[in-house]
Image (cartoon, rainbow, N blue to C red):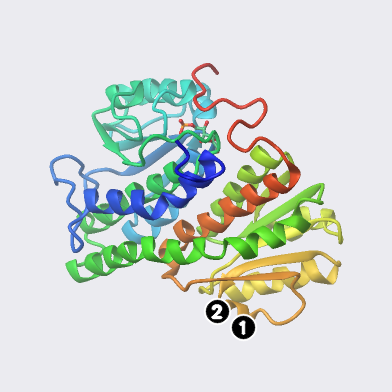
Amino acid sequence: DKAGHRHFMLKEIYEQPTVLSDCLRHYSDGTAVTIREGELDFAQTDRLILVACGTAHYACLVAKYWFEQLAGLPCDVDIASEFRYREPPVSDRATALFVSQSGETADTLAALRYARDKAARIVSVVNVPESSIARDSDLALPILAGVEVGVASTKAFMNQLGALAHLAILAARQRGRIDSAREAELLGTLRSLPGLINQALALEPQIEAQTRRLAEAQSVLFLGRGAMFPMALEGALKLKEISYIHAEGYASGELKHGPIALVDKSVPVVVLAPRDGLFDKTVSNMQEVMAREGRVWLVTDAEGGRLAGDGVWHRLVMPTVDPVFAPMLYAVPAQLIAYHTALHKGTDVDQPRNLAKSVTVE
Ligand code: F6R
């Protein structure tokens, strides 16, 4: 049942305020994270290892910024198919965390089994609580996104980030990095997200109009800095999955180390950049693109839009949000850009060619 929407993907994009609220209520009472101290002890762990595939891997890459910046916890992020065959050393004080919507992804499950007798603790973040990955974990944390039908993951990604954000806040508390006032403040920011996501969803008509132009491109670049870098990867993945347009995500600072050679007026560059401490640097990257006739689609907030100056191809003004959790809000335009570009191209949004919802063989 698509609840009146044209596709499951759009229905699931619109479910995000609701399912995220469910997830937030599950993991905190609004002022403190409610995961019990005995279930997870980030004070005793010397390293967090995050392993996943695809979109879930990008959720892990976002979470790395949170675990390192909020909790000072060293954090490795790996693609499951690389982790399992590289056979990396895993310290017996490490916590290994596996993220999977389906809980059945073959490479992620194999990576978990590799880590099982090495790491101190095996934790999973899953959407399907009775899945193989959940069953093989010491602790399985649900993301409570509900059934996701669209092959391109949207609401599960949002709720993976929701659950991981709480783990990072818990780690920060357990490692003595934040006091209870700061914990409540961070949780308050998370609680503001469903409302902000609703505001971002209201930008859909504008995104629909602009993607008419994007659909003509052969190739699209996505740029972001800090925790918005993984969002650039996710935006590019969503676009290529459902519109079949070649897209690549890059850290903005990497632009001049190669990808700028691709830039001309035929390659749109989507820049995901809320006004944060690194915004000025991103503006200069944008200017480098525009100096080569590149067309910049800037996704930012009101202040960022003002500071960016003239010359951008399109400016999408998002609600203002604390930069820490901005990736969760900016997932919405990334998803809608992919969705509407695919509609303009006439591709099958819910069943993209060559892809399966659950990858149970490697
Ligand atoms: C992308 C997408 C895939 C999955 C990946 C992992 O939109 O859906 O990249 O994220 O196959 O799947 P799970 O999370 O089920 O392990």
What percent of the width, then of the height, locates residue 305?
Answer: 61, 78
Quadrant (top left, top right, bottom left, bottom right) of the C terminus: top right
Amino acid beneath label 1: Arg
In the image, the residue with mark 1 has its CB under 8 Å from the nearest atom of ligand 1: no
Quadrant (top left, top right, bottom left, bottom right) of the N terminus: top left
What percent of the width, then of the height, locates residue 336?
Answer: 59, 53
Q: Residue at x 23, y 55 (%)?
A: 175
What percent of the width, then of the height, locates residue 143?
Answer: 33, 41
Residue 61 visible in the displayed image: no
Q: Residue at x 28, y 53 (%)?
A: 24
Q: Residue at x 62, y 48 (%)?
A: 339
Question: What mark, if any, has residue 306 been given in the picture?
Answer: 1
The residue lying toward the viewer, choosing from 162 and 230, is 162
Asked whether the beta carbons under mark 2 and mark 1 sit within 8 Å of each other, the answer is yes
Q: Residues within 10 Å of mark 1 (few under 14, many from 20)?
A: few
Left or right of residue 142: residue 279? right
Residue 347 visible in the displayed image: yes
Question: What mark, if any, has residue 295 been given in the picture?
Answer: none
Name the element at disc 2: helix
Dividing the picture into quarters, in which one does residue 279 lie? bottom right
Spatial distance from mark 2 to mark 1, Cα to Cα? 6 Å
Q: Is residue 167 above or below residue 273?
A: above
Left or right of residue 179: residue 261? right
Amino acid beneath label 2: Ala
Q: Residue at x 70, y 62 (%)?
A: 209
Name the element at disc 1: helix
The residue carrying mark 2 is 302
Q: Is residue 226 above or below residue 121?
A: below
